Amino acid sequence: MKSMTFRDLQDLPPTIDLMTAARALGIGRSKAYQLARDGEFPVRIIRIGDLYRVCTVDLMKVLGVDTGERAI
């Protein structure tokens, strides 16, 4: 599994699939799905039917990447 660079993270769409988030976190496929099923994935998951989606901004916050968001 190829690790993601900072640039890769910046280029992600607003939501990503579970495996892309797992790759960014360094988590393998089986463990990622197990954590998602158990409600323990380190980033909030959006479940749509059988699909797991992850909000990219949430992922970047967990990774400590500045998202450019500012409080009002």
Image (tube, rainbow, N blue to C red):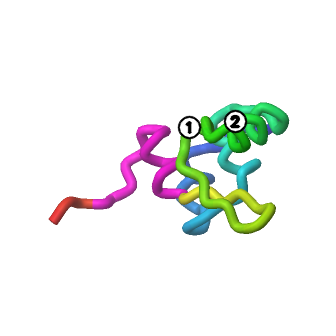
SS at circle 1: loop
Q: Is residue 37 visible?
A: yes
Q: Which mark is residue 35?
A: 2
Left or right, 4 with respect to 57, comes to right
Q: Is residue 23 visible?
A: no
> Could you tell me if the residues under marks 2 and 1 are in contact, i.e. CB atoms within 8 Å?
yes
Q: Nearer the viewer, residue 14 or 36?
A: 36
The residue sitting at the left extreme is: 72
Quadrant location of the N terminus? Answer: top right
Q: Spatial distance from mark 2 to mark 1, Cα to Cα?
A: 8 Å
In magenta stretch: residue 57? yes
Q: Amino acid at mark 2?
A: Leu
Q: Amino acid at mark 1?
A: Pro
Among numbered discs 2 and 1, the one appearing first in the sequence: 2
Q: Which residues are magenta?
A: 56-69
- Image point 47% across, 40% down: which residue? 62
On screen, 16 above or below 41?
below
Q: Position of residue 33 (x, y in %)?
A: 78, 41
- Image point 68% across, 37% down: which residue? 38
- How many neighbours does mark 2 have within 10 angstroms: few (below 14), some (14-19), or many (20 or more)? some
Quadrant location of the C terminus? Answer: bottom left
SS at circle 2: helix
Q: Position of residue 45 (x, y in %)?
A: 60, 53
- Image point 77% across, 32% down: which residue? 31
Select label 2 or label 1 by which is in front.
2
Q: Position of residue 56 (x, y in %)?
A: 54, 57
Left or right, 19 with respect to 14, comes to right
**Residue with the mark numbered 1:** 42
- How many neighbours does mark 1 have within 10 angstroms: few (below 14), some (14-19), or many (20 or more)? some
